[in-house]
Image (cartoon, grey):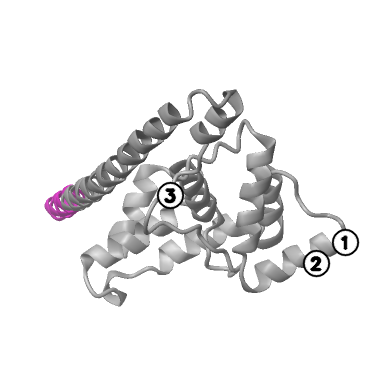
Amino acid sequence: MEEVLARLLGTMEHQQQMIQQLLEAQTQAQAQALANQQAQQENQLKAQRDMHGALLQCVSNNGDQGRSQLRDTERRVEGLSIPAYHGHLNESIGLYIHRVKTFFAAKNLKYETDETVEARCLAMVVANLQGQAAAWYQELASQGHGFTTLAEFEHGLREEFEPSDLQERLRDRLFALQQKGCKDLIEYIEKFRRVCTDVQEMSELDKVTFFIRG
C-alpha cells in the first residue's frame, strides 16, 4: 500500500511539474507577443510624438493655449477600438473594465486628472454599451440617475450585472471544466485561466487541484 501511495504521489508531482512547465511556456509566449505589440505601438507613438514636436515648433509663437492644445492631442492607435459590453452573464466585468482602461491609456486620455476628459471617456464607454446593458443605462439616464465618473459607472455596472454568488458560480465552472471538452491542452489552459481571472481568495494549491482533476 505504501508503495502504491508513493507512486501516486510521484505521478501527481510529475503532473504538477508538467502543468507548471506548460503554464510557464504559455506565459512566455504571451509575454513575447505582448512585447512585440507594445514595440509596434511605441514606434507608432514615437512617430506621432515627432510630428507633434514639429508642429509645436511651427506654432511656438502663437501663445500658450495653442501649444497646450497640441501637447494634449489624443493619440490615434490603428486597429484599436473601445471594448463593448452587453450585460451577458458570462461576460467578465473585471476584464471589460481592464480593457477599457487600457484603451484610454493607449489613446493618452488621462481621465484620472481631468474632469473634461473623464466626461468624454464616460460618454465613449456608454456609447459602446450593447443590448441589455445599453437599455439599462438608457433607463437610468432617462430618470436623471446617470453617472458622472468612470468609478461610479464601474460600481453601477457591478451592482446591476454581477451576480451576488459570482464566486460560487466561478468555482462551479472550474469544477465542471474538463480537458476532454476542449480541442487541445492549450485551449483548456486558456479557459481555465479566463475563469481564474475573476476568482478571489483561492490558493495556488486549490487551483492546481482543480486543474489536475479536469
Q: Say which of marks 3 and 2 sits in front.
A: 3
Q: Position of residue 141 (x, y in %)?
A: 80, 60
- In primary-sequence order, the first of circles 3 and 2 is 3
Query: Would you name the residue on which mark 2 appears?
Result: 139
The three-letter code of the residue at mark 1 reads Gln
Q: Position of residue 163 (x, y in %)?
A: 65, 61
Quadrant of the image containing the C terminus: bottom left
Structural crowding at the residue carrying mark 2, measured as other residues with C-alpha within 10 Å and reported as few (<14), some (14–19) or many (≥20): few
Judging depth in this view, the residue of 189 and 204 nearest the camera is 189
Q: Is residue 9 magenta?
A: yes
Q: How many numbered marks are there?
A: 3
Judging depth in this view, the residue of 45 and 178 nearest the camera is 45
Viewed as shown, does residue 143 lie left or right of 98? right
Q: CA distance from mark 3 to mark 1?
A: 35 Å
Q: Which residues are magenta?
A: 1-17
Q: Residue 76, labelled with which disc? A: 3
Q: Is residue 139 magenta?
A: no
Q: CA distance from mark 3 to mark 2?
A: 32 Å
Query: Would you name the residue on which mark 1 appears?
Result: 143
Query: Which residue is found at the position 61% from the left and 28% from the top?
Result: 65
**Disc 2 vs disc 1: Cβ atoms closer than 8 Å?**
yes
Does 109 appear above or below 207? above
Q: Position of residue 174 (x, y in %)?
A: 42, 62
Q: Secondary structure at mark 1?
A: loop
Viewed as shown, does residue 57 lie left or right of 115? left
Quadrant of the image containing the N terminus: bottom left
